[in-house]
């Protein structure tokens, strides 16, 4: 792994940051060092690093809590395809009372298979912040996603284990 980090492999750099964050693989837990290493991976445009930086700012891991910075990094991660960051942006908008913007973020996350976003849209519908059409579109999008990832191998794996579901 050291060689891969030295060769600027963004995945290896990101994994090193996780080791610092969690205090694993012989590294002492150090949120500040983890954040520094996440930034190195982000400089190489590693999407998961942007998401982790956002998380660090949202939770004060190695830095003071800064919601604006968290949002900025989650936006970068979401633009790179991070479904979790898209969901987080939806949550930020929901808590800020920006229901239309929250719904848009959740809908994008649903199209990428995020079941939690479907549940939030259902709650928004129940509470009167989303229409029946919005909720139905979310359900159709999620069903479409499940149809796209369906495979015989996944079905066999799910049937073989009680604790495994891919949907």
Image: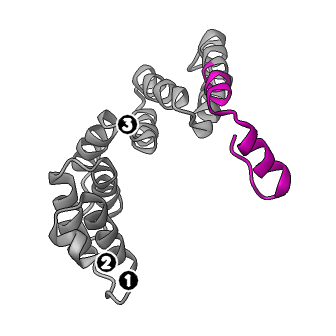
Residue for point 25% across, 66% down: 13
Crowdedness near tag 3: few (<14), some (14–19) or many (≥20) residues, C-alpha within 10 Å: some
- State which mark lies toward you, 3 or 1: 3
Q: Is residue 63 something one can see in this rendering?
A: no
Label drawn at residue 81:
3
Judge whether residue 142 is colored magenta.
Answer: yes
Label drawn at residue 23:
1
Determine which quarter of the picture holds residue 40: bottom left
Is label 3 in a helix, a strand or a loop?
Answer: loop
Label drawn at residue 88:
none
Give the mark, 3 or 1, whose residue is nearer the N terminus.
1
Report whether 163 appears left or right of 99: right
Q: Which residues are magenta?
A: 141-167
Q: CA distance from mark 1 to mark 2?
A: 5 Å
Residue for point 72% across, 44% down: 153
Report whether 148 appears left or right of 159: left
Q: CA distance from mark 3 to mark 1?
A: 28 Å
Residue behind mark 2: 20
Residue 12 or 83: which is nearer the viewer? 12
Is 71 situated above or below 1?
above
The answer to whether marks 3 and 1 mark residues whose Cβ atoms lie closer than 8 Å is: no
The answer to whether marks 1 and 2 mark residues whose Cβ atoms lie closer than 8 Å is: yes
Quadrant of the rendering where the C terminus is positioned:
top right
Quadrant of the rendering where the N terminus is positioned:
bottom left
Residue for point 37% across, 36% down: 81
Is 81 situated above or below 32?
above
Residue 18 or 137: which is nearer the viewer? 18
């Amino acid at each position: 792994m050291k060689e891969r980090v030295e060769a600027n492999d963004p995945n290896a750099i990101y994994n090193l940051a996780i080791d610092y964050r969690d205090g694993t693989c012989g590294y002492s837990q150090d949120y500040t060092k983890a954040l520094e290493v996440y930034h190195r991976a982000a400089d190489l445009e590693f999407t998961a690093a942007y998401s982790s930086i956002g998380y660090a700012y949202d939770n004060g891991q190695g830095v003071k809590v800064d919601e604006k910075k968290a949002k900025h990094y989650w936006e970068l991660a979401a633009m790179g395809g991070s479904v979790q960051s898209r969901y987080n942006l939806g949550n930020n908008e929901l808590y800020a009372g920006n229901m239309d913007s929250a719904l848009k973020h959740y809908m994008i996350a649903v199209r990428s298979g995020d079941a939690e976003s479907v549940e939030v849209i259902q709650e928004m519908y129940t509470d009167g912040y989303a229409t029946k059409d919005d909720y139905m579109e979310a359900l159709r999008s999620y069903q479409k996603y499940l149809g796209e990832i369906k495979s015989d191998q996944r079905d066999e794996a799910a049937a073989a284990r009680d604790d495994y579901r891919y949907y």
